[in-house]
Amino acid sequence: MKKNILAMAVLATLALPMHGQESQTTLGKFSLEINMTGSYAYHNIKEIGIKENLGYEFVPNLQALAHYESTIGLYDDDNTKTHFSSNALGGGLAYKFLKSTDGGSVDARFIVAQTIGGCDWKKTVYDAGIQWKMRGGLSPTISLGFRHENSHTTGIPNMNIIYGSIGIRL
């Protein structure tokens, strides 16, 4: 009997903080986004690529992100032109610090990713950025950010990049 009362008290205590939260379905807490990204040349390498994030809002305004990106580093030095491909998988957090009445938002994001598979350019990526989702539902997005890429490939230096991206988010 004492165990049942204790269990009910613990469950009631855990349920109290959830009572005041916004009502949102489990499916409504998920988001999916696809972004095209590009950066200026750094060490004669211009980086372009596609990023995908799957997010889950586990508490109001805070999302956990599963991250995948496929990038190409376009290299141009004197008469040598080539490219390096890279696929990275990682995770991060996004904090929604501004919301509009039509469902738009501005998020601060922090992501860490590591290359996977047999890619040309092996690296660890540390990414911090701001993303503007223009309205609720399926919406265009604009992002600006900074990334540090710790290269693990001989001949390719570490990079510090300011990037921009456009995409869509649901």
Image (cartoon, rainbow, N blue to C red):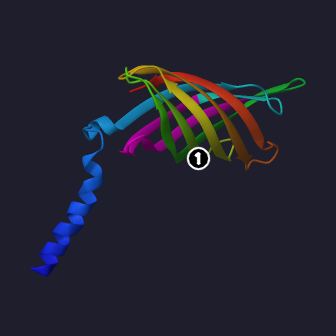
Quarter occupied by the C terminus: top left
Element type where label 1 sits in the image: strand
Q: Is residue 103 above or below residue 17?
A: above
Please identify the dominant SS of the magenta region.
strand
Q: Nearer the viewer, residue 64 or 90?
A: 64
Give coordinates of residue 69: x percent, y percent: 55, 37
Asked if residue 60 lies in the magenta stretch, the reply is yes
Task: Tell which of 47 and 122 is nearer to you.
Answer: 47
Nearest the viewer among 154 and 36 is 36
| Residue lying farthest to the right in this orientation | 78
Which image quadrant is residue 20 in? top left
Q: In this rendering, is residue 20 above or below 36? A: below
Q: Which residues are magenta?
A: 50-74
Q: Say which quarter of the image contains residue 101.
A: top left
Count residues near mark 1 (Cα–Cα under 10 Å), then give few for <14, some for 14-19, many for 20+: many
Residue shown at 74% from the left, 47% from the top:
151
The three-letter amino acid code for the residue at tag 1 is: Ala
Above or below residue 114? Residue 144 is above
Q: Is residue 75 magenta?
A: no
Tag 1 residue = 113
Q: Is residue 92 left or right of residue 31?
A: right
For this view, does 86 lie left or right of residue 1? right
User: Residue 78 at x, y = what percent?
Assistant: 90, 24
Q: Quadrant of the N terminus?
A: bottom left
Q: Residue placed farthest to the bottom in the image?
A: 2
Would you say 83 lies left or right of 111 here? right
Residue appearing at x 65%, y 44% in the figure: 125
Say above or below: 42 vs 56: above
Residue 50 rendering spot, x and y as whole percentages: 56, 29
